[in-house]
Amino acid sequence: MDWIEVLGYFAAFCTTISFLPQTVKTIKTKDTSGLSLSMYLLFFVGVSCWFIYGIVISNYPLMIANGITLFLSGIILSLKIKYK
């Protein structure tokens, strides 16, 4: 594994883990009033595209990071729609 791949995994870890606190807080409080539905819809679509792109080019950091981020942002988006 070269340094570029390590950098990719590190970047993927940082951006993916950043969604964990918001996801946990939203699940616990069920408060989505401060979250923008349009932002999360667009973000979810964008992350879906990055995930598919990662699959197409067989890039594991893209696949893993965006797969996890897709899952976490999907939870937040679902709760935003449910508790709107």
Image: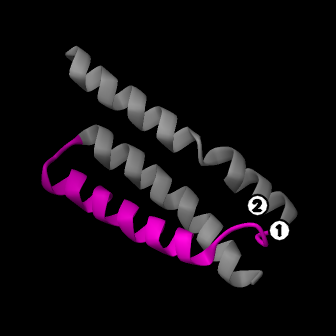
Quarter assignment of residue 51: bottom left
* Residue 73 is one of the magenta-drawn residues: no
Q: Indicate whether 63 appears above or below 75.
A: above
Q: Nearer the viewer, residue 71 or 16?
A: 16
Left or right, 52 with reference to 39: left
Q: Secondary structure at mark 1?
A: loop
Disc 1 residue type? Asp
Q: Secondary structure at mark 2?
A: helix
Residue 10: horizontal and vertical position, in percent?
41, 26
Which residue is found at the position 55% from the left and 77% from the top? 38
Quadrant including the N terminus? top left
Instruction: Identify the mark nearer the N-term, 1 or 2.
Output: 2
Residue 61: horizontal and vertical position, in percent?
31, 38
* Marks 1 and 2, how far apart at CA: 6 Å
Which residue is found at the position 78% from the left and 54% from the top? 25
Which residue is found at the position 40% from the left and 37% from the top? 12
- Identify the residue position indicated by label 2 in the image: 26
Disc 2 residue type? Thr
- Identify the residue position indicated by label 1 in the image: 31
Q: Which residues are magenta?
A: 31-59
The reply to whether callout 1 and callout 2 are in contact (CB within 8 Å) is yes
